[in-house]
Image: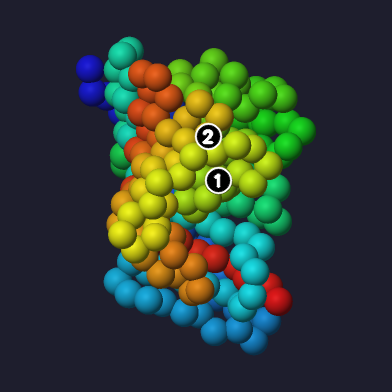
Amino acid sequence: MQHCWRLSIASCIDVSVMKKGAWTVLWCALSLLSGCALWSPGPQGDLTLGQGTVQSWRLEGRIAVRQPTGSESGQLEWQLRGGMEQHLELRSPLGTTVALVDSSPLQTHLILSDHRDYRAGDPETLTQTVLGYALPLQGLPWWLRGQADPGLPAQVERDAEHHPQRLSQQGWVMTYADWRAVGGEWLPGTIRLVREDLQIRIKVDHWVLEQKE
């Protein structure tokens, strides 16, 4: 049965508007301090900061989860900092915060909007237990950008323009669509992850890349 995130809207903290405004100010301030220009390829609002290798990135969009026990949907903001640290904010369809997830190679920390606090070394087990579905946080820093984790075996199928169309790794199958140029990179606008009966679809509204020489 289709439903929104399990927690009631009244129990969620409506911080999305404030966070979006704060991010805009922060990215602009960083660009001015570094003397770098913001680059936008089109109406999606994608941005790049600096030049060179991507050090950090952020995406904002929507997520839909489907499995035999039901389906859920909402908004999300996903950040990767320094190539290792992940921060994920899951929101209801109306934009209220449902859960915050901070993950590093050593530990994953998850906080629900009612302040219940969870920690574990295995992010898939933690998210399965608390959220009701597994998020493969160890592979997602690569997979969300259409790349395979270089340290593990993978199978990649490419489309006519040589963009990854299907990627299989660690028991997950990712399919990609709506590729677009962001700075010097091609990034997907739609990512679909499947493992057994679990399907996760992420629709990216915009990307922000921070690059460094």
Work out which residue is located at the far right of the displayed protein and give it. 106
Depicted 134 relative to depicted 143: above or below: above
Secondary structure under tag 1 reads loop
Kind of residue indicated by mark 2: Gln
Across and down, in percent, residue 161 comes to: 34, 63
Task: State the scheme by which the image is colored.
Answer: rainbow
- Residue nearer the viewer, 211 or 131: 211
Query: In front here: 179 or 87?
Result: 179
| Residue 108 percent coordinates (x, y) | 67, 31
Percent coordinates x, y for residue 213 in the rendering: 71, 76
- Is residue 14 shown to the viewer in this render? no
Q: Which residue in the structure is indicated by mark 1?
A: 148
Q: Secondary structure at mark 2?
A: strand
Q: CA distance from mark 2 to mark 1?
A: 7 Å
Give the residue displayed 23% in from the left and 23% down from the top.
2
Report which residue position mark 2 lands on: 169
Q: Residue 19 versus residue 131: which sits nearer the camera?
A: 131
